Image: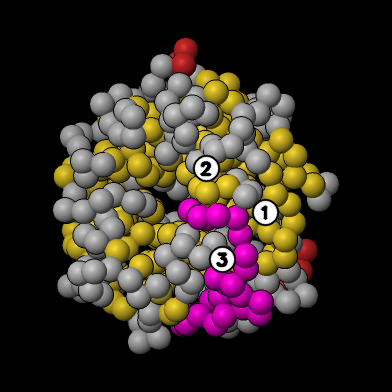
Amino acid sequence: MRVGLKRRFLYCFGLAGLLVTSSCGGKFFPEPCKTNCTPTNSGDYIYVANSSTTASSIAGFSLANSALNALSNSPFASGLPPNALAITPKNTFLYVGSISGGILAYTINSDGTLTIANGGSPVASGVSPIAMKVDPTGQWLIAADLTPQVLVFSIDASTGALTTQGNALGLDTGSTSNLYITPNGQFVFISLGTGGVDILTFNSTSGTISLSQLLKPTSSNNADFGLSSDPNSKYLFVTETGVNSLRVFNINTTGASILTELSTSPVKTGLGPSQVLVTKDGSYVYVANRTDGTISGFTLAANGSLTTISGSPYATGSAPVDLVEDQSHAYIGVACAGGNPDLQVFAIDTATPGKLDAFASKTTGTDPVLASAITGTN
C-alpha cells in the first residue's frame, strides 16, 4: 500500500478499517480478508506467459528497490504453451493453463523462482484452459476452456495437486476469452466474445458452480472480452469491441437481473479493448487497448462513474492483452502479445493520481515469444 494511500485509509476509517465504502474521496476499500490471507511468500514478483510453441516458458521478474529485474534462471521452461496464469492467495503455487491440453503447477520459491510440481506432468489433463483464476479462499481453481465449458478443481494446499469437483459445466455459445471471480467469491463471469458474458453463481464452501444468466453485447457485431470488478464486488466492468468502450454494471444480489447497466455506461476507450483492471483499493480502472497499443486510465467514483485520468491513453508495446497490479500497489504491468516490449511496467503517479508513468520494460525471452498472460504475487 502506498504511503499516501495508507495515511488516507487511516484518516478515513481509523485503525480498525472495518468500513467497506467511504465518502472520503469517493473511493472504495476492500472488505477485510477472512481466510487464507497471509502470504507465504512476501516478495513482489511478476510472471508472464510466453505462449509461442517454440519458446513455451514463464518469465519471472522481481520488483524491488525501484527496479525491475529478471529472476534467476528465468524464463522457466513450460512443457505446454501457456495461455493462462493463476496464483494462490498465499503465493505458494502458480498454475499454468494451456489450450494444448492441461494445467501445470509450479511451486513459488522464497526468491520468486519457480519449481515445477508433479514431475513436470500436468496436475489436470483433459482440459484446455484459455482462462482461469483461484477463488479468494484459495480452495478452488476455476478454469474455462475452448469447448466452451468451465471446470472447478479443489486445491491441495500442501502439494498443489488438483482434484476435479463435479462435472464440467457447459457454457453458452461463443469463444471463451476471460474469466473473473468477484472478490466476495459469489459470482464468476466468463466472456465469450460475440456470445457475450456468461454469469455464474459460485458456492465457495462446496465448490458448486451454476450457470445463471447471459449478458449479450450491445450489438451482434460487437464482442466482450475483459472483465473486472471493484474490491467490494458492487460493479462489473466489461470491455466491448465494436463500440470500443467499457461497459459498467451494478451487480445485484437480489432481483431478477444480476446485472444492471449504469446510465453513465458505456465509456469510450481506445481501439480493441482486450482487458480491464480495477486497482485493489478501488481508485483506478485501466483498460488495455490491443488494436492501438495503449492503456486507457480512469478514476472510479463511489457511484461507479468513470473520469479519464490526465495523460490517458498511455502508449504500450504492440498488442497489449493483459494487465496486473503489483503486490505493492504502486505499479501496473502489461503483457504485449506483439512485443516491443513483451513486458512493460508503469508506476502509478501520486502527484497526478492514477496517471501512468513509464517505469521499465523487458523482453521475456527470445522474440517472438507471444506474451499471452500476466500475473503477480498478492
Q: Amino acid at mark 2?
A: Ala
Instruction: Look at 63% across and 49% down and name the residue there.
Output: 341
Q: Which residues are magenta?
A: 294-321
Q: Amino acid at mark 3?
A: Ile
In the rendered image, residue 254 lying in the magenta stretch gets the answer no
Instruction: Look at 21% across and 53% down and name the residue there.
Output: 174
Q: Regarding mark 2 in the picture, which secondary structure is present there?
A: strand
Instruction: Look at 52% across and 49% down and name the residue there.
Output: 338
Judge left or right: residue 56 versus residue 216.
Answer: right
Query: What whole-number distance in Å separates the C-alpha atoms at marks 2 and 3?
Result: 17 Å
- Upstream in sequence: badge 2 or badge 1: 1
Residue 82: x %, y % from top left? 44, 34
Identify the residue position indicated by label 2 in the image: 371
Q: Residues within 10 Å of mark 2 (few under 14, many from 20)?
A: many
In the picture shown, does residue 190 fall above or below 241?
above
Identify the residue position indicated by label 1 in the image: 345
